[in-house]
Image: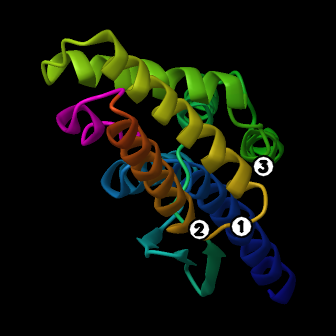
């Protein structure tokens, strides 16, 4: 009986860690809390696990039970990053498991690989920010090309600055604060030199 109980507890822990790893991939990379819990519960049900998943701001907690065996695990999970490629990859991995293309034993390594996938290159991030700024400029009715160019430069510069700061600090507020400060400086210089109107400078903050 002790051996059976130990085996049951080990199997419970392994399944719980798989579910928690999947929830962590989703939670820290931009998936909504509701969708994260729903997806983790679907994987939990597929694995035949009786467990509750409790997301908090900086952590994920899972409580599992199987007869007389219980398991509680807490993972650090700070949801301040957005990497939807990781979210999509994690969801696709679970879909492959549901379809029988992956075994349960392959899931931990798959989730580890996904969590270590590098983000989009800085140039692509800056290009996306610049394109978004240009689109917002058009939507808000900016008609002067110089004003649009100013917003594009401001957004792209802010994106590069955010990525640079991200290499040295994990503070969730420092990146947007510095990007907004840079946008304000660029806007103020533009108004002072007369290269853009005051209304244009007020729209130059990066997304």
Cα–Cα gap, marks 2 and 3: 17 Å
Does the magenta stretch mainly form a helix, a strand or a loop? loop
Quadrant location, the C terminus: top left
- Say if residue 190 shows up in the picture: yes
* Residue at the image point whose x is 77% and y is 55% from the top: 167
* Residue at the image point whose x is 40% and y is 51% from the top: 184
Magenta range is 195-206
> In the rendered view, does 124 fall on the left or right side of 135?
right
Residue 77 numbered mark, or none: 2
Marks 3 and 1 in Cβ contact (< 8 Å): no
The picture places residue 176, in percent across and down from the top left corner, at: 48, 57
Question: Which mark sits nearer the N-terminus, 3 or 1?
Answer: 3
Q: Which residue is mark 1?
A: 169
Asked where in the image residue 139 lies, by quadrant, the reply is: top left
Q: Which residue is mark 3?
A: 108
Cα–Cα gap, marks 1 and 2: 16 Å
Question: Which mark sits nearer the N-terminus, 2 or 3?
Answer: 2
Quadrant location, the N terminus: bottom right
The picture places residue 203, in percent across and down from the top left corner, at: 26, 37
Q: Secondary structure at mark 1?
A: loop
> In the rendered view, does 195 fall on the left or right side of 154?
left
Question: Which mark sits nearer the N-terminus, 1 or 2?
Answer: 2
Cα–Cα gap, marks 3 and 1: 28 Å
Asked where in the image residue 88 lies, by quadrant, the reply is: top right
Q: Residue furthest front?
A: 193
Q: Secondary structure at mark 3?
A: helix
């Amino acid at each position: 009986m002790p051996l059976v109980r130990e085996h049951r507890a080990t199997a419970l822990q392994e399944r719980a860690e798989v579910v928690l790893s999947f929830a962590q991939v989703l939670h820290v990379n931009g998936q909504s809390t509701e969708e994260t819990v729903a997806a983790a519960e679907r994987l939990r049900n597929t694995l035949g696990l009786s467990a509750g998943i409790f997301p908090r701001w900086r952590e994920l907690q899972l409580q599992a039970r199987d007869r007389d065996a219980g398991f509680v695990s807490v993972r650090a999970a700070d949801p301040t990053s957005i990497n939807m490629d990781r979210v999509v990859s994690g969801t696709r991995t679970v879909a492959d498991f549901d379809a029988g293309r992956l075994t349960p034993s392959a899931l931990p390594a798959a989730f580890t690989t996904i969590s270590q996938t590098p983000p989009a290159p800085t140039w692509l991030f800056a290009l996306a920010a610049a394109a978004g700024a240009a689109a917002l400029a058009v939507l808000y009715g900016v008609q002067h090309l110089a004003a649009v160019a100013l917003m594009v430069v401001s957004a792209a510069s802010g994106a590069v600055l955010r990525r640079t700061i991200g290499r040295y600090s994990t503070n969730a507020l420092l990146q947007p604060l510095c990007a907004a400060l840079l946008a304000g400086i660029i806007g103020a210089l533009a108004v002072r030199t007369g290269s853009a109107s005051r209304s244009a400078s007020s729209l130059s903050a990066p997304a």
